[in-house]
Image (tube, rainbow, N blue to C red):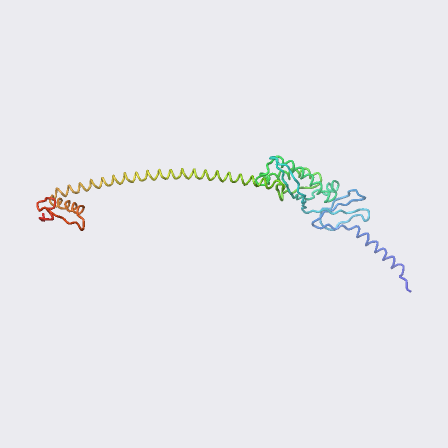
Amino acid sequence: MDHMPKPIGAAIAVLAIVVVVLSHSIVIVDETNQAIITQFGEYRRTISEAGLHFKMPLIQNVSYLERRVLSTDAMSQEYLTLDKKRAVVDHVTRWKITDPLRFFVTVRTETGARARLDDIVFSELRRELAVHNLEAIIADEREKIMDKVAKSARAQADSFGIHIVDVRIKRADLPPAVQESVFKRMVAERQRESSRYRAEGEERGQRIRAEADRERAVTLADAREQAQRTRGEGDAQAIAIYAEALKQDPEFYSFTRRLEAYRKLLGKDDVLVLDTNDEFFRYLTKGK
């Protein structure tokens, strides 16, 4: 049986050692990570730039930390509001590692960081929600409240090498035990408001109708006054015309006035018994 020459065996052994040493010396950091180099548990340096880096083999270790924004989805908690109501709030914290050394020294891992952040945010939420009513928390003031919580928590998280991007409420509700009573009270309040609005609307409608009736009466009165004035002016003009006609031809004026009287007095089927000497009907009996 042939044996491998000693020089070749030694070369292979050396190559294997070199490969092992290199594999323990190379640190590859991608775009999403940053790295901490430690030696026997003590910090040595931070690698923030992506690419190929080196460390001392075997005696130095590498710990990778996220460069991207991380999120912590905390468990729901009950909080007491200013109006003495209990609110169940479920929040999300978005954060990123900005100081790898401080992060590594204080919390070391993402799990440790999430535990610290939960404690901080829970405390700030409890303090902030205690000075607001539940209605404001659920509706109008939610964004302002969470901005204040994020600002306060951000100042505390900075000591861990963490920057809190924002804190947001995913859900804010009452505990199930009190939801039904609150809903009933809200329905009653809405019914009272609707009754008040209907009463105010009816009152306003009556005022509008009264004002419209008054304006209508004034308009009709003005119209009647104008009509009477117009008729008076027309009668005056007619009298003037008749007077002028009388001066020009008294007999023709008498004839037209008598015809007008006949038209008003006599109907279509009327039967007349006339006295031939009656002056009123002289145009019917004598011709003039």
**Position of residue 32 in the picture relative to residue 265 (left or right):** right
Residue at the bottom extreme, as displayed: 1
Please provide percent x and percent y for residue 251.
11, 45
Q: Nearer the viewer, residue 114 or 234?
A: 234
Q: Position of residue 258 (x, y in %)?
A: 14, 45
- Dividing the picture into quarters, in which one does residue 177 lie? top right
The residue lying toward the viewer, choosing from 282 and 18, is 282
Q: Using the rendered view, name the quadrant where residue 244 is placed.
A: top left
Number of callouts: 0
Judge left or right: residue 262 versus residue 203.
Answer: left
Give coordinates of residue 210: x percent, y percent.
38, 38
Q: Quadrant of residue 126?
A: top right
Q: Position of residue 58 (x, y in %)?
A: 82, 48
- Is 60 left, or right, of 145 in this rendering? right
Question: In front: 270, or 230?
Answer: 270
Which quadrant of the figure contains the N terminus?
bottom right
Note whether 207 is above or below 1 in the view shown.
Answer: above
Q: Is 280 positioned to the left or the right of 64 in the image?
A: left
